[in-house]
């Protein structure tokens, strides 16, 4: 799956056309509200969102690292399964003060914080 990342890692999208064709939602911004409040309902409604960071690269680098680590350990989803899911952690503070973590997914990540990212 080396084709998944570009040489400068300005995006992380599925290599196969079949998986890329499933993407139907583009979210501009990587803030906590979008990642924790908007993306989960989109997934529940069976949309296939990608998250594009408007400035910087921190979210993209985080996703690339998680994707690489999950695929090294065999815990990542294969593209042949028809899905390409990148996950990120969302922490929630419950009413009783307990902190819970949940993995939330998206179908790609990118940045507009570089010339190459804007082209992709």
Image: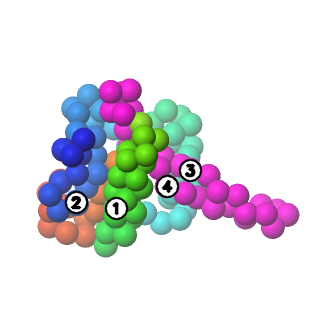
Residue occupying image coordinates x 36% and y 34% = 78
Disc 2 + disc 1, Cβ < 8 Å: yes
Query: Which region is colored magenta?
Result: 78-107
Residue 101 is drawn in which quadrant? bottom right
Residue occupying image coordinates x 40% and y 53% = 69
Secondary element at image label 2: loop
Q: For the residue carrying disc 1, how many other residues have a C-alpha within 10 Å: few (<14), some (14-19), or many (20+)?
A: many
Gap between marks 2 and 4 measured at Cα = 18 Å
Q: For the residue carrying disc 2, how many other residues have a C-alpha within 10 Å: few (<14), some (14-19), or many (20+)?
A: some
Decide if residue 50 is in sight here: no
Residue occupying image coordinates x 51% and y 42% = 42
Residue bearing the label numbered 1: 60
Residue 10 is drawn in which quadrant? bottom left
Secondary element at image label 4: strand
Disc 3 + disc 4, Cβ < 8 Å: yes
Gap between marks 3 and 2 measured at Cα = 23 Å
Compare marks 4 and 1 and give the one earlier in the sequence. 1
Compared with 22, 118 (above or below) is: below
Residue bearing the label numbered 3: 103
Question: Which residue in the rendered view is the most extreme toward the right?
Answer: 96
**The disc label shown at residue 88, or none:** 4
Gap between marks 4 and 1 measured at Cα = 11 Å
Question: Which is nearer the eye, 72 or 19?
Answer: 72
Secondary element at image label 1: helix
**The disc label shown at residue 9, or none:** 2
Q: Position of residue 46 (x, y in %)?
A: 49, 32
Compare marks 1 and 3 and give the one earlier in the sequence. 1
């Amino acid at each position: 799956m080396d084709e998944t990342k570009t040489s400068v890692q300005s995006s992380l999208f599925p290599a196969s056309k079949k998986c890329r064709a499933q993407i139907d939602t583009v979210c501009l911004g990587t803030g906590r509200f979008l990642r924790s409040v908007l993306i989960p309902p989109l997934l529940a409604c069976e949309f296939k969102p990608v998250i594009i960071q408007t400035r910087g690269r921190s979210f993209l680098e985080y996703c690339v690292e998680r994707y690489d680590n999950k695929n090294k350990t065999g815990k990542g989803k294969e593209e042949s399964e028809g899905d390409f899911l990148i996950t990120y952690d969302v922490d929630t503070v419950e009413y009783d003060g307990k902190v819970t973590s949940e993995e939330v997914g998206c179908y790609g990540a990118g940045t507009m914080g570089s010339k190459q990212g804007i082209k992709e």
